[in-house]
Amino acid sequence: MQVVDNNCLCSLSKKTYIALGSFDGLHLGHMRLIKECINLAKKNNGLSMVFTFKNHPLTVINPDKAPKLLMDNDNKASILRSVGIDILSLVDFNRELMETSAEDFIENLVNNFNLVGVVVGFNYRFGHKNQGDVNLLRELSIKYNFTVKIMDPLESNEQLISSSRIRTLISEGNIIEANKMLFKPFVISGRVIPGKQLGRTLGYPTANIDIDEKFIIPNAGVYYTVVRYKDKLYKGMTNVGHNPTVALTNKINVETYILNFDKEIYDEYISIYFIERIRNEEKFDSVK
């Protein structure tokens, strides 16, 4: 898979089918749309592309209302590579893009990527002030000679699968229901940093990861997790919260005990896949 940074790609001679959207979290609805794009490209001897943003558009349009993200771009790229996308275009959503008209946005895709077909969700919006919708997209497809495939909504437990719904479930600690809507279990990745190292005094050293505040964190509690370190998987127990036994702080920590693991991994990156919430945090009298 080729990763394109901010449209930095020479014009393509091969025709391209593009999946358009924010695709935060890569839930089942997103993946159905993306796989349709892949199928269309293969059927018509073209290239499949996901065109998406590095940052959520609301971080520019209305920062106070920008949601916490479900997934970082590295994990997103890894999943898209695994399902067979040919090109991933990651674009900074900035003020210039925010002020681009709907038609100019589409014309740029046609000119930059030899666009012959797009696949979008039923509620897809684009262009300045979200002026573009699927109806305008159909009109522009006639003018610029490309096809449009609009995907119907997908439901789980009679509720629409959406990134916002998944964010709510995760913030409530309902990981099981959230994971039912995701292509892969909810994951937090980060660099391992030194904690208070009090876990060592309790006989179980733990890994604390550096959390970027732009990503969503599950509700405080203890979770069954699976930890990926250098392409190997380990069972884990993760505490999300303030570590009430040993800390009097408002800073949220994500601290994981990795079973059958004794390596020093400070400054290395791990991924923590959340499987199930076990219980609330518990405060004991001391660490003794």
Image: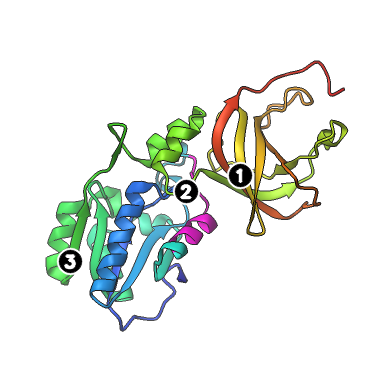
Residue 226 numbered mark, or none: 1
Q: Is residue 147 above or below residue 60?
A: below
Q: Residues within 10 Å of mark 3 (few under 14, many from 20)?
A: some
Which residue is depicted at the point 73% across and 18% down?
A: 283
Q: Earlier in the sequence, mark 3 or mark 1?
A: 3
**Mark 2 = which residue?**
184
Q: CA distance from mark 3 to mark 1?
A: 42 Å
Which residue is depicted at the point 69% across and 51% down?
A: 191
Q: Is residue 216 left or right of residue 39?
A: right
**In the image, what residue type sits under mark 1?**
Val
**In the image, what residue type sits under mark 3?**
Thr
Secondary structure of the residue carrying numbered label 3:
strand
Q: Residue furthest top?
A: 285
Q: CA distance from mark 2 to mark 3?
A: 30 Å
Which residue is depicted at the point 50% across and 60% down?
A: 78
Nearer mark to the viewer, of 3 and 1 = 1
Q: Is residue 230 left or right of residue 182?
A: right
Nearer mark to the viewer, of 2 and 3 = 2
Give the magenta part as a residue range: 68-80
Is disc 2 in contact with disc 3, using a CB cutoff of under 8 Å? no
Residue 147 numbered mark, or none: 3
Point out residue 66 in the picture as x, y percentages from the top left corner: 45, 40
**Residue 129 in view here:** yes
Q: How is the image coloured?
A: rainbow
Point out residue 97 in the picture as x, y percentages from the top left corner: 37, 59
